[in-house]
Image (cartoon, rainbow, N blue to C red):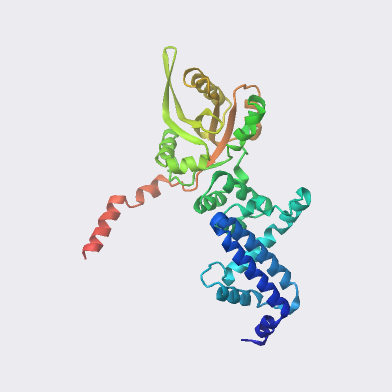
Amino acid sequence: MTDEKMELTAMHDYQKWIANIKKKIRKSQIKASVQVNQEMLLLYWDLGKGIVEKQKLAKWGDKLISQLSKDLNKAFPDVQGFSRRNLELMRKWYLYYAEYVEQEIIAKQVVSQMKEFIIFNIPWGHNVRIVAKSATLEEAVFYANETLEYGWSRAVLVHQIESGLFARKGRATTNFKRTLPEETSDLAAQSLKNPYNFDFLSMTENYNERELENALISQITQFLLELGTGFAYVGKQYELHVGNSDFVLDLLFYHIKLKCYVVVELKTTKFEPSYTGQLKFYMTAINKQIKDENDNPTIGILICKHKDEVVAEYALEDITQPMGITEYRLGKALTDAVKSSLPSIASIESEIKKIEET
């Protein structure tokens, strides 16, 4: 043991502090049967705060975290979470949110209600990834709230962060404030994104609307994840019979939270004002033929390759039905030449079989 470590462990202040920590750990273990995650997070917060405060004192030295890890692991050999790495994460987590929590405490006077904070109500693994991947405190709080509201798994959370959901959610051009009741317009707006990220697709450069539609439906799980919570798939190329004519809309969904049908029209070109007329017609048909008295008015979404924001706003100006205009992005577009040069699944399987037989 180095002189620095000997001095640290011999300090009365350190002994008193770690004794208090051990007491809190035992207390949290007693409550574990009721609130394992929350009690642990509150403990982690207290540890992170304590480390930050103690490290401000020069006499504690840079070896504090290493020594603390050894002492806690020795005292609680059956408890995981006291590695040096995890203690460093607790310190980082505390520093990341300290100002936010302190401001909320001052504003709402919730000193005795720490459990109300969103970060104490999502798993530790989620907290670690949010802090590691978020660029700002505002973004981090957004993902913490979304995680709690929608019950995201860790994998889904990481996907949403890496897809830039914070910058895309609620950014579509819509007329919802004017065409929907106040209590649902915000929810409807937040249900749309701009742009939609279709990077899970592998498309040729010269694809058409039907090919894009088929590709999305073939990846329906990923598509629904990108659309967001609440969307339920009804069908593609949905047939409508109006008067003596037949019509087909691209995609039909039902939004469980908004309690309404959602007509989605895909356009592989730049947005044109004439597209709203076609979508409006489909929405009217759904309202008259499919919607029942318990459903809210149908919402329409135009997903285009590109859109001019001003043109989109002008196009929605006189439309009285709720409609949104947004864009999509492809992250894996392949040229026809490249795609044709790639080996087929059959040829790959054949090669694998040959290798196995040798």
Position of residue 343 relative to residue 214, above or below, is below
The residue shown at (69%, 62%) is 95
Residue 175 x, y percent position in the rendering: 64, 28
Position of residue 253 relative to residue 278, above or below, is below
The image quarter containing residue 241 is: top left
The residue shown at (64%, 50%) is 118
Q: Who is closer to the viewer here, 262 or 214?
A: 262
The image quarter containing residue 178 is: top right
Position of residue 244 relative to residue 330, above or below, is above
Residue 83 x, y percent position in the rendering: 56, 71
Task: Classify the position of the N terminus by image quarter.
Answer: bottom right
Residue 338 x, y percent position in the rendering: 40, 49
The residue shown at (55%, 72%) is 76
Residue 244 x, y percent position in the rendering: 42, 12
Which residue is the extreme one toward the right? Answer: 106
- Is residue 123 visible to us here? no
